[in-house]
Image (cartoon, rainbow, N blue to C red):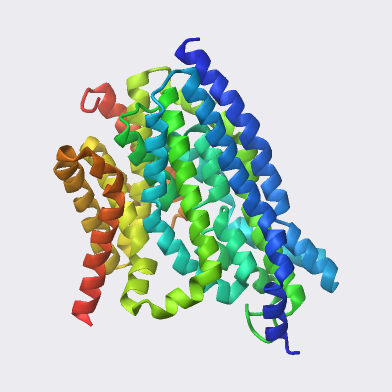
Amino acid sequence: MDNVSLVSEVSNAPILWLLCGITVGISALQAALYMRQSKKMTAQISLDPAVPKKAFRVGLISAIGPALGVFIVMVGLMASIGGPMSWLRLSIIGAAATELSAANIGAEACGVVLGSQDYTLMCLAVSWFAMALNGAGWLVFTGVATPSLDKLRTKISGGDINWLVVLSSACSLGIFGYLNAGEIMKGIGNTIAVVTGAVSMVLLMNTICKKYPKLKEYSLGIAMVIGMIFSVGFDQLIK
Amino acid sequence: MNEREVLEQWKKSSIKIGTPTNIIAALTAFIPVLWLCTRYDCWPPFSTVMTAWGLIVASFGALYFVEPISYYASLGLSGTYLGFLSGNIGNMRVPCAALALDVTESTPGTIQAEIVSTMAICGSIITNLIATTSAVIVGGAVLSVLPEFIVDGLTRYASAAIFGATFGNFATKYPQVAIFALAIPVLLKLFTGFSAALVILCTVFGTLFIARIMYKKGIVE
């Protein structure tokens, strides 16, 4: 058997689903444990149980849009790194671009091209090591240092509750400013998606959602669809 | 118990759940590659793996620290563990958590905010798990019947629209700060060769610094 088919067969071996499932399972378990903790705490501080329920629903619904993106990216990724590994990587820390570059770096370290005839099982192993080592960077850092991050935030906020609110928003603005800047630099189509996404969210939140607060839960999904329609429409127009 | 004691208790149990799960997941992610090498006896030379690791750290290493620090304020304690284990932080976890805080009118830093963002992130994780798992089962079939422009729209523009929408929502609350949050990274990307990690650091701390000055001067409150 040639290397390309061998690599593809091995990376789709049925037992791999089980082996990758262990880590996916840990992610699901962690979410379940945090939900249990939230439920306990809600009862303890006599918070209206409708509040966490509503929050959960917002997460569930608002994630549908981006999850559709993940769905499609995942189908693409499956073609290059196999089904089980794509499932593992995209269910945990991974973003498709990061995983693909890690897989490519693995191939590069072997001096071959990913998916080529020279890409042997040993190179596949280097790619998989690269992906696991890369993911471990974030997981180990957050696993160990998150409590210190909390202290850092407390220190910067200096116990001023009003400033803490501004600080949290400023950090989010900074990180989303960065993410949006990256999109804007990609070209006019992405810029249109950013601008129309932003404008429709602002309009939704300040007009219709004021009248029908229930709609707020769907606002992010609606804004995303509007942004995409404008960008895709633009692409079709200039074609 | 007062609010502070309750928060302390929340933090303690969050750490108890988050630390072991994140570290164990980092280890179990190696199981597939260990199986591969053992089953097919294809152990790569140690030096090659180290070379790959070196290249990886050079490309992503700084982000291991910069991202958790930058996202912490919006994710909270349990949200940081959850977000970095489950991924898709910018396009899914933070937008969901931020919207949930908005919808439930919770103030950041309070116990209610911690519960709300945790629950929102857990909800989004379930949606994501459903998406990846169904991609495995029906992905190829679905993709072959979807019109090309929809696939194209989702792959190229979904993130951009979500980023824009989330930014827009924060920006209406603090428009003066938002201008700088967008201008700093654009200028840095245009005129410097800074690495991604350095641009994030300059943007987040630059924005924070400007927000602090505005807060002191009473421009934002």
For the point 56% across and 20% down, the residue is B9
Residue B168: image location, x then y, percent: 25, 46
Viewer-nearest residue: A221 or A118: A221
Vertical comparison of A210 with A135: above or below: above
- Residue B16 located left or right of residue A154: right
Residue A96 point in image, percent of width and height: 51, 64
> Up-down: is B70 above or below A130?
above
**Which residue, as the protein is rendered here, is positioned at the far top?**
B1
Q: Looking at this rendering, what residue extends furthest in the bottom direction? A: A1
Which picture quadrant has residue A32? top right
Q: Is residue A167 left or right of residue A208?
A: right
Compared to residue A105, the image places residue A6 above or below, namely below
Q: Position of residue A82 (x, y in %)?
A: 62, 72
Residue B96, picture quadrant: top left
* Residue located 47% across and 33% down the image: B76
Q: Going 54% across and 42% down the picture, which residue do you hit?
A: B82
Compared across the picture, whether A213 is left or right of B187 comes to: left
Whether residue B66 appears in this view of the structure is no
Q: Answer with left or right where residue A223 lies relative to residue B156.
A: left
Identify which residue is drawn at 85% across, 72% down: B41
Spot occupied by residue A235 in the image (x, y as percentages of width and height): 24, 75
Residue A40 shows in the view: yes
Give the tally of numbered discs. Answer: 0
- The quadrant in which the N terminus of chain A is found is bottom right
Q: Quadrant of the C terminus of chain A?
A: bottom left
**Closer-to-camera residue (B83/B208):** B83
The image quadrant of residue B143 is bottom left
